[in-house]
Image: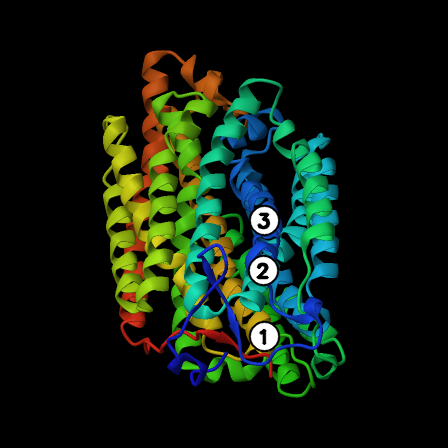
Amino acid sequence: MTSRDARSDSRTRDDAGGLAPSISEPASTPEDQPAQGHRLGLIFSALILTMLMASLSQTVLATALPTIVGELSGVEHMAWVITAFILASTVTMPAYGKLGDMFGRKPLFLIAIALFVVGSAVGGAAQEMPQLIAARVVQGLGGGGLMILSQATIADVVPARERGRYMGVMGGVFAFSSIAGPLLGGWLTDGPGWRWTLWLNVPLGLLCLVGVAVLLRLPARPPRDRGRIDVWGMLLLAIATTAVVLIATWGGAEYAWVSPLILGLIAAALVAGGLFVWVQSRVSEPIMPLLLFRNRNFVLTLVAGLITGVAMFGALGYMPTYLQMVTGYSPAQAGLLMIPMMGALLVASIVVGRRVAITGRYKTIMVAGTVITALGLGLLSTVNADSPIVLECLYLGVLGLGLGCSMQLLTLVAQNSFSWRLVGTATAGQNYFRQVGATLGSAVVGALFASRLRDLLAGNLGGSSGTADMNSLTPEAVRQLPEPLHTLVVEGYNEALMPLFLWMVPLVLAATVLLLFVQEKPLATTIDQD
């Protein structure tokens, strides 16, 4: 896809009356041609299965988290249950994107699903927090591939102009799983136990494995796309990303900013980052080609996506915990209370996707989405322990509406900026930085939340013998505290988390300013495989 392709505004229709992609250069065999009609529906079904599994994994533990850390006695490691998965998936995204462009996406799909299933099975059997975190890392190694390959595969078979409606549905699936995840996690935690939030991925993963193996048939990659794998680039990117996340998680919380460990991590991030850029300028098939960063729209949407990740996962990761601890709701009820946010995200994603497919316009919607996101974060920061639950749900709905108006369009703009040969790499690069934002949001908000909570509880409760072990506090234990003590704990949770949302507002407004400079190029109506 190039900007020249976008000058044509023609669209072809399949026999069922739906929109089907037009192809600029037909392939020699039916298997090599981009999918149309019924075959496209089968491919899309396989992608939806994998997207559902990957997105569920990011949310299903949210409502189970208080029970997990209470049972495994690890509140100081609470953030890592979520951060470990996001970090592992983040560092593998560019690798999956580049290798998919070089060798095809289907084999990588199968490997990613297998890793995800293994991580889920091991995590469900974990007896200690380090074991659970290690299993989440393995899950993330597969989850990164599921998210990237699903989005990149759509670009293989659907032109950019029509892709908005498909990506809108995929965004809707993500929103649905974000609703179903906390609900499912809460129901399983209240019923058979939190371990089933992980074990449930095993049969679902096997179903996805069969679906991808049978249904996914894609155009063959041309031989000229294949070259030497950029192993050093992958390794250096993983080191730099991990160091940045550890700095954000530990700096100023568990370790002083001038401690040898933090200074060493800063040095490692700088050295690995510098070497990564040097390697990318030398190898024949760089994992993240520097030419991507010469494209204005790619860079602007990249930074905006990073900020979106911070806002979304900073709220999504810890609001269920807040709702349980402060309002006294059960895990399942806390999951239900997240419906306004994810319902608004679901509806907005689908409506926006269809609107973009019809009009081809997207810039105004993206800008408006970031403004609404900032408004939602600002409103959430005003919530206190006595706020009506209806008001909290309303504010979550505003946040979800803003995210739904902008999130999937950022990836669409990035894909539309490059040719078909680089679409997987561009998709991976854009998603990588958004996941870096998600990792930083989860890590920083989690670390600040835990640190502030410890300080506030220590200050409010003093040396009370009945609260000596704060690591073992569960929602049930908080509900059973005597009234004066209960109020102090609830206020501590509120003061520890809600002001953090206000700190994110300037970041999101900065994304709004950046998106004002996006050039609204016409969306391509053909798939150029030349």
- Mark 3 to mark 1: distance in Å? 38 Å
Residue 98 horizontal/vertical position (percent): 65, 71
Crowd rating for badge 1 (residues with CA inside 10 Å; few <14, some 14–19, many 20+)? some
Instruction: In the rendered structure, find residue 45 and report the number of the disc placed on it.
Output: 3
Q: Locate residue 402 relative to residue 465 in the image: left or right.
A: left
Mark 2 residue type: Ile
Position of 405 compared to 438: left or right?
left
Look at discs 3 and 1 and give the one toward the viewer: 3
| Mark 2 or 3: the one toward you | 3
Residue type marked 1: Gly
| Residue under numbered circle 2 | 148
Q: Is residue 444 visible?
A: no
Q: Earlier in the sequence, mark 3 or mark 1?
A: 3
Residue at figure coordinates x 64%, y 70% from the top left: 33
Q: Disc 1 to disc 2, how far (Cα)?
A: 22 Å
User: Is label 2 in a helix, a strand or a loop?
Assistant: helix
Residue type for callout 3:
Ser
Q: Position of residue 382 (x, y in %)?
A: 23, 40
Q: State the residue at coordinates (61%, 75%).
A: 271
The x and y percentages for residue 238 are 64, 65
Say whether residue 58 is visible.
Answer: yes
Q: Disc 1 designates what residue?
A: 273
